[in-house]
Amino acid sequence: MLTIVSWNIQYGKGIDGRIDLTRIAREVHSDGLPDLLCLQEVSRNYPATDNGSDQVAELQILFPEYESFFGASHDRSGGRDGGRRQFGNLVLTRRSPTQVLHHLLPSPADSNAKFMYRQSTEMVFPTNSGGLRIMNTHLEFFSEKQQQAQVQRIRELHQEACAQFREPGIDLPNTPFELLERPEKMIICGDFNFTPDSESYKQMTAPIPGKTPDLIDAWNTVHPDASRVPTCGVFDHKQWKKGPHCRDYFFLSQNLSQRIQEVSVNIKTDASDHQPIRLILEV
């Protein structure tokens, strides 16, 4: 079995306004440690967030049994003590990946919206059934134009990986040209910043042409007749005036649909403005 938890931790800022990564770690431990912990909104050396602490280093201390892989959506000067200001997504894993790829997602010009750059970290893991790609991401909130371009890029990356799987290139072992497989089976999780009734959601789950497996919503697969549990706005009604709703998901390639064991949401914690979501998969 493989357990993945995805959580937008809002750089550790709880509903009480206090930034506390120890509280984040305590919540994760109390629910049972996953194999992979995919976090969004992790900050490094930003004076405006937690006095400019390096949250990647702090989380590594809090989860010493995990390897950490940070994907910076932006990397800027002006950080604490002359360091780099970085903001992005972090994967903590108890399983060692065979390959890690960091993809900067598109941000087409949109003069009507504020925005920040977005990225997705893709990791390949060996499994008993031949390998698995897992992506951790966080999409644009303020610009629908940018968000939809990012959804399209994710679908293109999935198509690209599947095409490489079917038609691998020439392998030159022990060189930078060594061929490492990108499996067809994929999970992508994170804060997508769209709701289930949005055009972006429809775009994400639309049929993919050719031989590429479609992307399905794991929640709908496991709970086809149940109301969706909200993943944000449960406690923070100041930022989320519409109240509790869903913006965080696990999307899986269709060839994994029969392997899903559980999809759940922790709606008890107020350690962030989002709720952690959990997937258990037979691998």
Image (tube, helix red, strand yellow):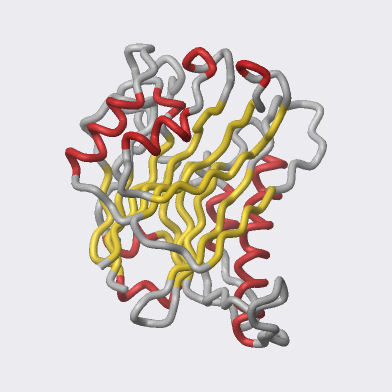
Viewer-closest of 34 and 188? 34
Compared to 147, does 15 lie above or below?
A: above
Q: Is residue 168 above or below residue 84?
A: below
Q: Is residue 114 left or right of residue 264?
A: right
Q: Give x and y (percent) for residue 54.
A: 50, 27
Q: Nearer the viewer, residue 219 or 276?
A: 276
Q: Which residue lies at the image location 66% right of the left edge and 85% below the top edge?
A: 168
Residue under the image location 47 percent in, 74 percent down? 185
| Quadrant that contains the C terminus | bottom left
**In the figure, is residue 146 to the left or right of 97?**
right
Q: Quadrant of the N terminus?
A: bottom left
Count of marks overlaid on the render: 0
Image position of 193 with respect to 154: above or below: above
Task: List x then y, in percent, for residue 253.
Answer: 47, 70
- Dividing the picture into quadrants, the one containing residue 182 is bottom right
For the point 58% across and 44% down, the residue is: 71
Across and down, in percent, residue 28 comes to 26, 39
Q: Quadrant of residue 219?
A: bottom left
User: Height in image: 229 above or below 160?
Assistant: above
- Classify residue 20 as left or right of residue 188: left
**What residue is at 69 percent from the left and 48 percent from the top?**
104
Residue 142: image location, x then y, percent: 64, 30
